Amino acid sequence: MKRMLIRIMHRLQLRESWIIFFILGIIMMTFPFLHIFNKPITLFGFPLMFLYLMIGWAVSIFVIYLFMRAYSSHNHNPDEKKDV
């Protein structure tokens, strides 16, 4: 399990992944996708468009968190000894 997590974190460091997630975020905000969720339907009392935007926002923040975690674990070298 830990090996798989390390492999996933390594893959998230790729520049292409950053670009792909950025483009997916832009596509998520285009008219066709907004039109799909702009319906007079409510789930748990919330409009569908509101849920679409809030869940998309939360997923975007989570993806950025994963990228930053992968970046910091790559730059942090625990074997390196610091002079005190």
Image (cartoon, helix red, strand yellow):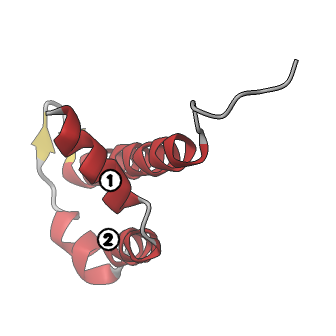
Give the camera-side residue of 29 and 3: 3
Query: Given the current orientation, which residue lies at the most extreme right position?
Result: 84
Q: Is residue 19 above or below residue 65?
A: below
**Please, is residue 25 above or below residue 77 in the view?**
below
The residue type indicated by label 1 comes to: Gly
Nearer to me, 44 or 8? 8
Residue bearing the label numbered 1: 56
**Label 1–label 2 contact, CB within 8 A:** yes
Q: How many marks?
A: 2
Residue 61 in picture, x, y percent from top left = 44, 46
Task: Name the quarter where the N terminus is drawn.
Answer: top left
- Could you tell me which residue is drawn at 35 percent across and 45 percent down? 54
Image position of 41 (left or right of 73):
left
Quickly name the residue at label 2.
28
Q: Residue at x 88, y 17 (%)?
A: 84
Mark 1: which secondary structure? Answer: helix
Residue beneath the point at 59% across and 38% down:
77
Mark 1 vs mark 2: which is more N-terminal? Answer: 2
Name above or below for residue 13 compared with residue 57.
below
Q: Residues within 10 Å of mark 1 (few under 14, many from 20)?
A: some
Q: What x and y, as percent, mark residue 76? A: 59, 39
Residue 8 locus on image (x, y percent): 26, 51
Instruction: Pick the residue in front: 76 or 31.
Output: 76
